Amino acid sequence: MTVRSREEIRTDILRLGREAYGPAHTARAEALAAEAEATGDRSLLIKALDRLVSAYSFSSEGPKMLVPFSRMLRMWDERPDDFDSGDVHDLHWKFKWVNGDAIRHPDVPLASIEGLLADMRRRYRLAGHSERPVHSQEFELAWYLGDTERAERARSAMLLADRDRMADCRACEVRDLGKWEAERHRDEAAVDVWAPVLDGTSSCLHEPHYVLSYSLLPLVRLGRADRARGNHLRGYRLVRSVEALTEAVASHLEFCALTGNEPRGLEILAEQSQRWEQHGDLVMLMEWAACVALLMRRVAELGHGERPVPGPKGREWTCEALLEHARSEALAVADRFDRRNGSTVVSERVRARMDAEPLLEELPLGLGGPALRAPRVPVPPVPAAPAADPAAQLAEARRLSGAGHPAAPQAWRRAERAFASAGAEPSPGERAEIAEGAAVGLPPEPGTAELLEEAAGLYEQAGDPGGAVSARARAVLVRAAAGERDGVRARMDGLCAEAERLHAAGAATDEQAVAVPLFRGRLRLALLGEEQDPAQAAADLDADLERLAEAAGGLPAGPAVRARIADIAELRGRLAAPFDPEAALLLFTDAAEGHREAGREARAAADAVLIARLHLERGEPQAAEAAARAVHGDPERVVLLGPEDRAELPYLLGRALMEQGGSAEEAGALFLECMSLHVRAGGTGASAQMELGRSLMARERFADAATTLEDVLPNLGPEYGEAAPVQVRVWLAHCHRRLGEPKAAAEQFALAADATGDWPDRRQHAELAHEAAGALNAAGLHAEAVRAYRRAMEVWREVGDAAMVVRALRACAWALSAAEGPEAAEQVMDEALRVNEAAAAEAGEGEARDALRAELGQTHMQRARLSLERTDGLPDADVDSPEQYAVNVAASEEALGRCGAAAEVFAALGPAAERDRLGAEHMAARMELALHRFADAAGRAGRMRAAVRALPAEEAPPGLLEECDAIAEAARTGSPAPARVDGADGA
């Protein structure tokens, strides 16, 4: 084995301090400590032990720090001169860590912990430090032991003591003080204490991570669901991959279990299986197991005790089995602490946490995932008929069906049960009504069609052939909706002919005579896409429906017939919507009025949804909002909607608000409502989830938006089209960029670009490839950015956008400068100049030429800035070597020439480019100062001053007049001002 020098080991210790904590970091710290000890250099060993203490503290093995820290204390007591000032500071600072971690180790006797605290107090007094950290440690110990009086005394003493450089950071203090209030059920006080961390005023390595997790349940109890939701989405992103933050992850599990988000809890459980292996810190394991037990209890209570769930490695787990394991594990660890402490405080806390009851039935998070509860669709309250009275139940079901009420199918089932309970036999006609009414609420499956055909047979037995034909027509519609095609058109045509014959003979009602051809119209609309000429087929269908409406208008105008005429108008509106939206809007409006006149308020509410949707599609968000609000804001109307319309309504209203730039907060709540309704019904609500992500971005809640958008991606199947996942990835990339995660942004832009690679619209592919390159550059991956810019450049050439080719070349040059140096970059920037000049020359006259000339000015300016990348500052013959002086002078000359060229280009463009011209002149004047051309600089500054004063005040570049004065003064005194060079724009 090669023995390394002390300096090599020292360098690695320093380098390790800049690396992320985790198992690899800890292993490296242990190895370096062993190497340092082998050298016999006590000073080096102190550094290594100090690094090892930090590594253990920020891992799941915190209690291990006791050994290296105790050794550091012995070394200090033996030879304090071996410690430099930084070592002395770290020794006293980490006393706090060791005290806290000793509490978390049940094998450390309580007397030893009290001894550590006393030793800390003694050493802090000897060193002249404030005792604030000592009181803080006593507060933590007393709190842990359940000694409330001692904890309050220590807390008060801590707050009264001076804050010096040994005090915990404000964020950590705030975390603990707020948690103390929350555990005392003083939620408002807790949230107030946490405010500096929650609002971003105070932060540190582990905050706001813990505070976000601790704040979840207090916020729920205070009724601040939106803040709790946001803190969960943002907070879990921060802690999900940090080994040392298991307790915070456990708090997120607890939140899910107590707010109706058990599916989200199961997702977290699956993602965090490694938490079971953290036996180095038993408090982490105990808290994790307790919150897993709580989650499993809630899942079991929802009827999923036998559901497979993720658990510790080595076996398969069901919910019930993991509940038993997690509960016993948590209590076993708690018992070890209680035996050490001589109390039952820890076990009582753990039991209380595992036995907690839900705070809310559901707090929508805006995340997809399967529901664990049975689907629930709200239905409007209806007066209950006497349960044991079949006749009353039957009358109620008929009334609700006649009104088109969504509760009608349930009413027919109640009627059926009422007959069975009374031991009565319904007549064939009643049995037919019950079968047909119940079938109307069922999904379009072959079994539903069979139930309708059974009803038809019963109608015939009852001597109602019109009812039989109508039921059979419904059955054909259901079979077609279930995918059946053979003979459905012919059967429906035959049924229409039969209905017409029966009506002529007086054997079918007016409503039945209209309903059957209406059903045929619905069938034809459903099969329109299979026609050879869909447009002609649509025109033929509309003409037939118009004739049907005219014929129905000639019948006696009872409610049932009026309702069918309104149904025809609605069907014609659906037919017209893709071809003639304006006509469709009029038809939907007629349908809504007709349904209201016929007493079919439920159908009128559904028509309002159609109207809102069409307004939105027509780019009329204000009208869409009005139509949607008329129903959504009316509790008596909104409950009349069927499940699909009920879920779509808040989506349409939210979209309408977003399109108008309205309240993103209200829109977000509406999208959450939509998602909740979809998930309850067994769906995902992916479209609403996309819009929720967009609304969160509009509110600048980028962490929440990123979590929401990441969650929706797997749910965007083929039915959402190719564009939806691309749009989500673009939004997600923007979120990552705003969160300071450029590498993640680059990944999403690149995935979006790949997805659009074969799209006919090459511009979109080029834009995404360009964005990906920019994000790679921002992430410091300059070589990868160069390759990405070159790919984007080729696509821009395909598109024929010369300006974007130039921008890609310029950005590529800057990335290349960072990757390889300015010399290689200058060649690319010179290529940008050549391409730009050629494109401007070929553009002729007009706006296109002016735009390319403006780009040329910018390219000259960027070439000027790039020239200065070769310098080490202003030319200074007294300081620079002869070679460097020559380089600095040549670069400054080059920059000056490029600025002059840019100024000429901008001047030729007139007033529209005046600000750009002044920017070029300003940099040129700075270069003249740098080159000691003081007269030239003074003259240029004077011309600039006159030009700025000639501009309207609102158009004058801020601060430029002052800059002109500064340049003139520097020229007068003969002192070169430092050249102010702005960074590349990356465009």
Image: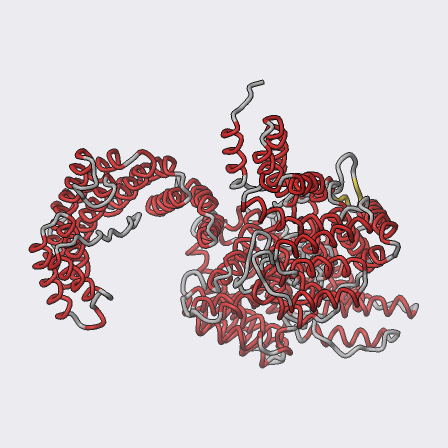
Q: Is residue 283 visible?
A: yes
Question: Looking at the picture, does residue 123 appear above or below residue 439?
Answer: above
Q: Is residue 944 left or right of residue 619?
A: left
Between 115 and 21, which is closer to the camera in this rendering? 115
Question: Looking at the picture, does residue 170 appear above or below residue 980?
Answer: below
Residue 15: percent from left, percent from top: 50, 37
Question: Looking at the picture, does residue 369 appear above or below residue 772?
Answer: below
**Which quarter of the figure has residue 455?**
bottom right
Residue 608: percent from left, percent from top: 54, 72
Give me the residue at 52% from left, 25% from top.
5
Give me the residue at 73% from left, 39% from top.
277
Spot the residue most to the top: 1
Residue 972: percent from left, percent from top: 11, 59
Between 311 and 432, which is closer to the camera in this rendering? 311
The N terminus, quarter of image: top right
Between 189 and 601, which is closer to the camera in this rendering? 189
**Which quarter of the figure has residue 257?**
bottom right
Give me the residue at 73% from left, 55% from top.
372
Give me the residue at 43% from left, 45% from top.
749
Between 390 and 849, which is closer to the camera in this rendering? 849
Residue 525: percent from left, percent from top: 52, 58
Q: Is residue 476 visible?
A: no
Q: Total label count? A: 0
Q: Is residue 713 left or right of residue 472?
A: left
Question: Looking at the picture, does residue 416 appear above or below residue 103?
Answer: below
Q: Which color scheme is applied?
A: secondary structure
